[in-house]
Amino acid sequence: MANLETRELRYFVTVAEELHFRRAADRLGIAQPPLSRAISQLERRLGVQLLERDRRRVTLTDAGTVLLSEARTALDAISTAAQRTQRAGASRQPLVLATKAGASHELLQRLLDAVTDEPALGQVEVQLCEVGEQAGLLRSGTADVAIMHKPVDDLVGFDTEDLYTEGQVVIVPAAHPFVHRSEVVLADVQEDHAVPMARWPRLDGTYPDGPGPEVRTQSQIAQLVALAKALLVIPASSRAWQWPEHVAVPVTDAPRITTVLAWPAGSRSSAISALVRVASGLSDPAPRTDRSPSRGNS
């Protein structure tokens, strides 16, 4: 079995991304000839051709495409291992908790209040992020644990602890006809052609088809809803960011959402165990019944 060095993997990934040896060499801060020799040596050791080269261009072979994906994963894993090791060895290092801005607000408040009485935890640092960013923060070692939601978030490669399950609401502008109803169903929301559903990116970064606007941030969707340009279906407890121009209406047949704590599989430290224990002991967030157009407290 061929032994691969971190240096040559980094060299190969840079060439594969640039598809140009001179640009790759400039990016790496080395001369071009040793870079070319390193790639040739890697190909000889693996026994496969990784790059097609001619005077005009460089392209990846099928084997090169596979190595690019695997090398990126390996380099990320090495970087993450170093970062987690340094964090674990540092004295009084805070536990970093990632969560979507505006999501699970009441849970987060009660959790932070509760951990002050947990000596095994020490300081908990909150890192707010946008939708879908928690997985990357965990995989890079930037965050230790995250509040996430299934089945909508990417939980591949993580251990999880279920905290609570809840229904969803549709956030509509205050002048929308739905504000006069006690509840709606998904078909009502999907068939509203005057104010379409906002479209969030899938896990692969692509957007589903539809007439609604493409959004990536909570601030984008908040303003679009207030301007009557989009509707949004979210977990009932994720409404802390509601504007005065917003009203939440229960969607009775929307898939139920489970809020979880997630952390990289196999890396449950004593601090993470303490946080899981504290979070599991909290009661479910109380459902909010006030549907008036005002800021949410859930």
Image (spheres, rainbow, N blue to C red):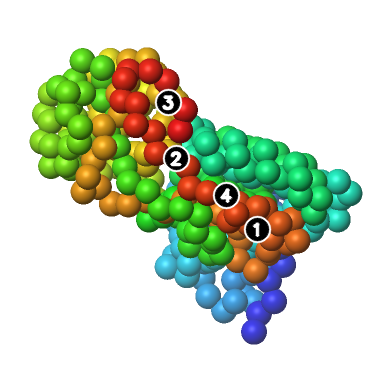
Label 1: how many residues lie within 10 Å, few (<14), some (14-19) or many (20+)? some
Answer left or right for 168 relative to 192: right
| Amino acid type for the residue under numbered disc 2 | Ala
What's the residue at 60%, 66% (across, down)?
265
Residue 271 spot, x, y in % from top left:
74, 56
Question: What is the spatial separation of the Cα atoms under label 1 and label 2, in whole angstroms?
Answer: 20 Å
Secondary structure state at the residue bearing disc 3: loop
Question: What is the spatial separation of the Cα atoms under label 2 and label 3, in whole angstroms?
Answer: 12 Å
| Amino acid type for the residue under numbered disc 1 | Arg
Find disc 4 in the rendering and name its residue. 282
What's the residue at 86%, 56% (across, down)?
89
What label sits on residue 296 in the rendered view? 3
- Mark whose residue sits in front, 4 or 1: 4
Q: Looking at the image, which residue sits at the far right?
A: 91
- Of labels 3 and 4, earlier in sequence is 4
What label sits on residue 286 in the rendered view? 2
| Amino acid type for the residue under numbered disc 4 | Leu
Q: Quadrant of the N terminus?
A: bottom right
- Of labels 1 and 2, earlier in sequence is 1
Find disc 1 in the rendering and name its residue. 277
Label 4: how many residues lie within 10 Å, few (<14), some (14-19) or many (20+)? some
| Amino acid type for the residue under numbered disc 3 | Gly
